[in-house]
Amino acid sequence: MQHLQDILRSQKHQPSAIEVIRRCIEACFDCAQACTACADACLAEEEVAELRYCIRLDLDCADMCMATGRIVSRLTKPNRLLMEGALNACADACRACAEECERHAAMHAHCKVCAEACRRCEQACQELLRVMS
């Protein structure tokens, strides 16, 4: 994500805020990838019916993370309410997905990895919300 860092550094924001923004964007995109891969891995499991809700949350979370990462990436004149709404929704999606994946983590390594990515993204979104306050 070197290009992201270069672009963010060119923006006229506080360096500390830029670092929080960068971590949030990277966490969102990383989480989206982890959730997509986890959903796919769940589909390959023998007991796929037991993982149906997990797959659903993985896919919902991936979509929310991608959208939020894209919204946060656009720093020119953001709409504060929209940004806060996206960050809150993303944190909620990540929390729900992490909780579900944690239920399956003992049996499925992909769920453990996904839960970790979700928790990291949830924290990054909450950190950016605090900086925006």
Image (spheres, rainbow, N blue to C red):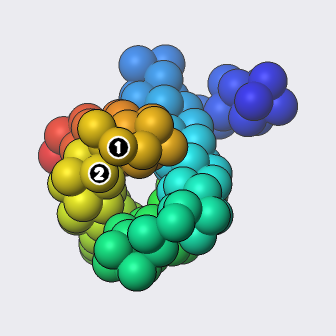
Disc sitting over residue 33 in the figure:
none
Residue 7 position, x and y percent, is 75, 34
In this image, 107 relative to 131: left or right? right
In this image, 42 relative to 108: left or right? right
Q: Tell me which corner region of the image, top left, top right, bottom left or bottom right, holds residue 26.
A: top right
User: Which one is in front, 32 or 108?
Assistant: 108
Dots 2, 1 in contact, CB < 8 A? yes
Q: How crowded is the residue under tag 2: few (<14 C-alpha within 10 Å), some, or many (20+)?
A: some
Vertical relation: 38 (above or below) 119 = below
Residue type of the residue flagged with mark 2 = His
Instruction: Look at mark 2 in the image and give the residue it sits on.
Output: 104
Q: Residue at x 43, y 69 (%)?
A: 47
Vertical relation: 40 (above or below) 116 = below
User: Which one is in front, 130 or 39?
Assistant: 39
Q: Residue at x 47, y 73 (%)?
A: 48
Q: Residue 73, can we see it?
A: no
Q: Residue at x 79, y 24 (%)?
A: 2
Where is the N terminus found, in terms of image quarters?
A: top right
Residue 125 position, x and y percent, is 32, 46
Residue type of the residue flagged with mark 1 = Met
Q: Tell me which corner region of the image, top left, top right, bottom left or bottom right, holds residue 112.
A: top left
Q: Tell me which corner region of the image, top left, top right, bottom left or bottom right, holds residue 84.
A: bottom left
Q: Residue at x 31, y 60 (%)?
A: 97
The answer for how far apart the CA atoms under marks 2 and 1 are is 6 Å
Instruction: Look at mark 1 in the image and give the residue it sits on.
Output: 107
User: Which one is in front, 111 or 130?
Assistant: 111
